[in-house]
Amino acid sequence: MEHIIAFLHVVMAIMNFSRTNGTFCSLQGEPVYPQLSKEGDIMVGAIFHFHSKWQIADLSYSVRPPPVKCTGLDFRAFQFSQTMIYAIEEINNSSSLLPGVSLGYKIYDSCSSAAMGVRVAMALVNGNENSDLNEPCTKPTEVQAMIGETFSSASIAMANSVGPLGVPIISHYSTCECLSDKRKYPSFLRTIPSDYFQSRALAEMVKYFGWTWVGAIRTDDAYGNNGMAAFTEAAKQLGICLEYSLPFYTTYSEEKVLRIIQQIKSSTSRVIVGFLHTWDMEMLVQVFFKHNITGYQWVGTEAWFISPGVAKLDKNNIVQGAIGLAIPKTTITGLKEFILDVHPLKSAGNAAFTEFWEEMFQCTFTMKNESKYKTVCTGSEKLSELENAFTDMSLMPIFSNVYKGIYAVAHTLHGLLGCIQSCPIKKQPDPFTFLKHLKMVRFQTKNGEDVFFDENGDPPAKYDIINWQRTKENQYEFVNIGHYDSSFSPNDRLLINTASIVWAQNSKDVPRSVCSESCPPGTRKAVQKGKPICCFDCIPCAEGEISNMTDSIECEKCYQDYWSNPHRDECVKKDIEFLSYEETMGILLTAVSIIGALTTIIITIIFFKYKDTPIVKANNSELSFLLLFSLTLCFLCSLTFIGQPSEWSCMLRHTMFGIIFVLCISCVLGKTIVVLMAFRATLPGSNVMKWFGPPQQRLSVLAFTLIQVLICVIWLATSPPFPFKNLKPYKEKILLECSLGSNVGFWAVLGYIGLLALLCFILAFLARKLPDNFNEAKFITFSMLIFCAVWITFIPAYISSPGKFTVAVEIFAILASGFGLLFCIFLPKCYIIILKPEKNTKKQMMGKVPAK
């Protein structure tokens, strides 16, 4: 509505201007007059809300709207006015700043109306108090700059109207971030930080206390809506979610307020961010008490946070423990005394002074029927006996902003007018030139505060952080618990003394306000479908992945040699697995290997002791001893498969095994051939033994063995076995194995052993039915049968066994086949040598004595 009225005023002004001849300016409509004024060489304007309400009797627009009727006197505007007058008087009395140039002022009332604000802004630009000017319309603006307005909505309307004319507007209390846009508001500056910084300060403060799930209530105007939009954006960047963001205004219907209350009651967040004006917060305190809404942690903006009015109304601890921002405290020497001395008001505007005095002391100078006060004012009443909004100095930081705005104008003029000992020029500078230099001005106040504007016309943002605490007298006290300074680095901007904070409901601990509790290390956050990012489930990390901090968004994979621990919060080195001597299976296999070697040695000793006996001689003692030696090596070579694989052990274990086994089989094959040849030699006229005597036997064993040695040499030369880390079978551990290098080489070694074993088996099988005198062939057949069975079953077991069990299978095959050869070939002979010595005779061996 206000914007519509402002638009109509502008349209009417344009239409009226078009009716003139363009030579002289003529006032159309009702003139407006300042509340307070004083002439000077250069004039400074100001617009404050002396009244908090306004009325228009007829809004039909069928007739000219009547003058706006202002109601509800606001003492704060008088405090702002006194501050401005004090600054101007101080400058006029200064010998160093604008010497010889006097500043005057015109202070208007906006009635808290944007439309009225535009109208009086135009009056300040045009100087149209009089009805007949007879002056060219091209005359300079009436004022050099304007101070005001207090509220962002009014400042937006004024800046839109006056901006194209280049007249600066310096606000002391309009914080809307939107006013920093110099494309829209080129002539707007302010001495109070933008809500851009306040929003980020609030968001950082909320984040500091760990509140990620908050509600918000905002004034439904430019200040609240733009401020909350900036806060929402900053909060989102910091991972804070808004459960709700509700508009509120004092004129809302009861039904609309009830909907707001219901939404707050049904919410789960325990923190409320209030981007509100003072009067909105005053009403909310009463509404919350009426509906018994308590226990919430309030976070507030500087607009209401140190308001005595809110504190006075909160008798039920609705806002107890609230934390918020305030403009840093400052002191201007002599200002308090000047504000409380109202005589300058009397000289500056009698009508305003009269209304002010009557409202202040609730009396009347003239007994009128319409007067609401019956007591007659004497004019000698004492302010020292009062305690109200005018005597309250809690807004001294805002008064300081008015003070700094006037001094910014004065310092800019001082430079433009070329003032040194005196000012040679007293003429008002061009508005655009003045605006350009005003944006670049920089000075220090008499208290040492540095004042300047950034590229957006904003000052640096500094806030005190305040905590509401109850005193012993049950009164609220605004306790400073920290500060925020946007000029510092991001990590140093916010400083809070948490030890001195009193929380809502006098809680000793920081209130919790989260949609979901933090995910501990070992889990990751998974956003719940259809809900904000602050509402999530905690999903355990998969195997091999970890998260080592709280609220991880994703789990990280461990490096190849590492694996996640059971808690999934740390990567630990994988266990390295191999067949070791320390484990049970390694100990058993080692024991069996040693037992086999010892048994073989014992048998060798027995054979050596009885080497001259017929049974040893008859069974080719030379090959027997060579076979026993190779079997001893066979048992011992299995030990190379146990222990941590190394480059040398991997090459030795397979090649040594292959060569030793070929040596064994070659000896058995030689013994088999000897049995066959011996039988042939018994036939009449046969001289076959001369073709396979001891030299031929040795040569055959050597030849068969050399072939295996050649295969092994080629294997080692081309692609030898090597140790490697096998990561595939198990995710949580590493199998340290010997890679074959060349599979062809490995299977060639085994194949050659198998070929010799098969040949030996066939020959022994052919000799199985020879007379009992030569029954060694039967034992060789049995040993080869066992040998072949072991190695045939070895192949699938070897392929399918994982890790160290592959090695165990291979060792088992070596030991089983070794014991098979040892027991089948030598045990029967030892039995005769030890237990049946009577059979160990030549006659028995020649078959001439019947066996008993």
Image: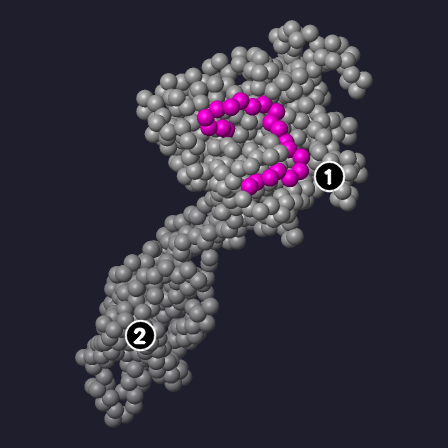
Asked which quadrant contains residue 231, the reply is top right
Q: Between marks 2 and 1, how big is the CA–CA gap?
A: 109 Å
Q: Position of residue 641 (x, y in %)?
A: 34, 60
Q: Label 2 is placed on what type of residue?
A: Gly
Q: Residue furthest left?
A: 695
Q: Position of residue 475 (x, y in %)?
A: 65, 15
Q: Does the magenta run of residues contain 32?
A: yes
Say which element carries label 2. helix
Front-most of residues 13 and 701: 13
Say which element carries label 1. loop
524 relative to 75 in the view: left or right: left
- Observer able to see residue 445: yes
Q: The N terminus is located in which quarter?
A: top right
Residue 614 lies, with reference to residue 330, above or below; the image says below
What residue range appears in magenta?
24-44
Query: In this figure, which residue is indicated by the disc labeled 1?
Result: 65
- Observer able to see residue 535: no
666 relative to 199 in the view: left or right: left
Name the residue rendered at 41%, 31% in the picture. Answer: 427
Name the residue rendered at 73%, 39% in the picture. Answer: 65
Q: Nearer the viewer, mark 2 or mark 1?
A: 1
Q: Does the magenta run of residues contain 312?
A: no
Q: Position of residue 442 (x, y in %)?
A: 38, 31
Query: In this figure, which residue is indicated by the disc labeled 2?
Result: 745
Front-most of residues 628 and 469: 469
Q: Residues within 10 Å of mark 1 (few under 14, many from 20)?
A: few
377 relative to 767 in the view: left or right: right
Q: Label 1 is placed on what type of residue?
A: Pro
Name the residue rendered at 25%, 93% in the picture. Answer: 685
Q: Which mark is residue 480?
A: none
Quick check: marks 2 and 1 in contact, CB under 8 Å? Answer: no
